[in-house]
Every structure is written in structure tokens, then in C-alpha cells.
Image (tube, rainbow, N blue to C red):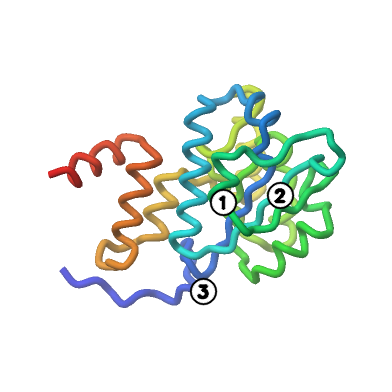
Amino acid sequence: MSSLPIRDQKNDHLLTPENAALIIIDYQPVQVNSIASMDRQLLINNIVGVTKMAKLYKLPIILSTVNVKTGLNFETIPQLRKEMTGLPSYDRTTINAWEDVEFLEAVKATGRKKLIMTALWTEACLSFPTLDALKEGYEVFPVVDAVGGTSLAAHDAALRRMEQAGAQPVSVAQLFCELQRDWARSETVPGFMKLFIETGGTAGIQFSYDKAE
């Protein structure tokens, strides 16, 4: 029952705390309220869980909004914003965040080549920067159950397009497990379990029972 030595965290082909960054784009009231591909409360729970995950494993987080400074849109929803106190938000007019200078500079400044990508909507603000990042040699991991589209068909079509271009779709639970990787990494185990419990889902239910015993 001995674990192998921890692999090179920067060059591992899987996601690690040292080779990945989290990108969060346009989780604003108008966008959240227009989602029709999944339950919106579950969507909020999941993106908040993903943000807490990034904080637990100390991943760089790049947050972006659209049209706040122009007065046409509101800031990031409060449930999510409160998890990112002190972090800058890169506001844009571009639908494709990859075409915004400040956003692009912030992403490149992380030095990470694996991008955990989340955005609303799947068919626009997620797919466009994903396709551009792939063209520039990044590996992109869209989080399928923390993003949403204006219809299930639009969401699914966008995921297929990104996957065909080389993106690697992941789920929230998969991310938690991939970054933790080993129960023997005891420093982050309590936070790992808390992520499941607070985010919900079947594993979270079981972990909450186990913790109560």
C-alpha cells in the first residue's frame, strides 16, 4: 500500500497544482439567468466549487467579465465573487476573451499551459477562447458541468466542436480527484472532502455521512 513518488508536478500530463490555471469568464446575472442547458442553482454550486478547488490547490485564477464598465451588464454574481476577494477582474467588450489585451496578458503571465476553462455561454464565451488557446499550443479543459448554454443543443454542439479541435472535457468531480490524486497527500485531504460536501452530488452526500460518524 505504498504510493509511488509524486511525479514532476510541472511536466505531468495530468492536471496538477503546479501546471494548471483556472479561467472564469462571464458568470454575471444576465448570463446565468439565460442558461437552459442545466439547472442554474447546480451551475452556481459547481462553479463556486471549482473556484474553491483552485484556492485549495493554489492555482492561478483569471476572472473576466463583459460590458460592466460600459454599463450594459452587471458584475460577477456575488456567490462567486466573494470567493475571489482581492483578485482583479478583467472587463472586456469582446465576446471572445482571447481578443482582449489585458485578459490575454493575464493568462500568459501565469506561465501555465494547461487551462481549466469555464465560461457562460458554452457556445460563445467558452468555445471561442478555447479554440484560440488550442491554436496557440495550450491544453484546454472545459468543465462540462460548471458551464452552460442557452439550450442543451447549443451546449452539446459547442462541446463537440471544442473536443474535435483538441480540448479535453472534464467534470467537477474529476477535477477534484485529479488535483488531489492521492489520499496520502494529507495536507489537502480535509479540503478535498469539504469540496465534495459543499458542492453536492452523490459523493458529497456520502462524505458528509462519513464525517458525521
User: Closer to us: mark 1 or mark 2?
Assistant: 2
Asked which quadrant contains residue 60, the reply is bottom right
Picture residue at 68% right of the left edge, 49% below the top: 130
- Mark sitting on residue 141: 1
- Marks 1 and 3 in Cβ contact (< 8 Å): no
The quarter in which the C terminus is drawn is top left
Label 1 environment density (alpha carbons within 10 Å; few <14, some 14–19, many ≥20): many
Q: What element carries label 1?
A: strand
Q: Type of residue at label 2? A: Ser
Q: In this view, does 49 lie to the left or right of 161?
A: left
Q: Which amino acid does label 1 sit on?
A: Phe
> Which quadrant: the N terminus?
bottom left
Residue in front for this viewpoint, 204 or 151: 204
Judge left or right: residue 209 versus residue 76.
Answer: left
Residue position for label 2: 64
Q: What element carries label 2?
A: strand
Which of the two labelled residues, at mark 1 and mark 3, occupies the earlier sequence position?
3
> What residue is rendered at 45% in x and 44% in y?
172
Image location of residue 13, percent across then percent down: 49, 66
Q: Is 95 left or right of 51, judged from the image as shown? A: right
Tell me residue 183's x, y (percent): 26, 61
The reply to whether dot 1 and dot 2 touch (C-beta < 8 Å) is: no
Mark 2 Cα shell of 10 Å, populated few (<14), some (14-19), many (≥20): many
Please say if 122 is above or below 9.
above
The residue indicated by pointer 3 is 10
Q: Height in image: 77 above or below 86?
A: above
In the image, what residue occupies the spot 25% across and 67% down? Answer: 184
Q: Find residue 44 and report its horizontal and vertical position in percent.
A: 52, 35
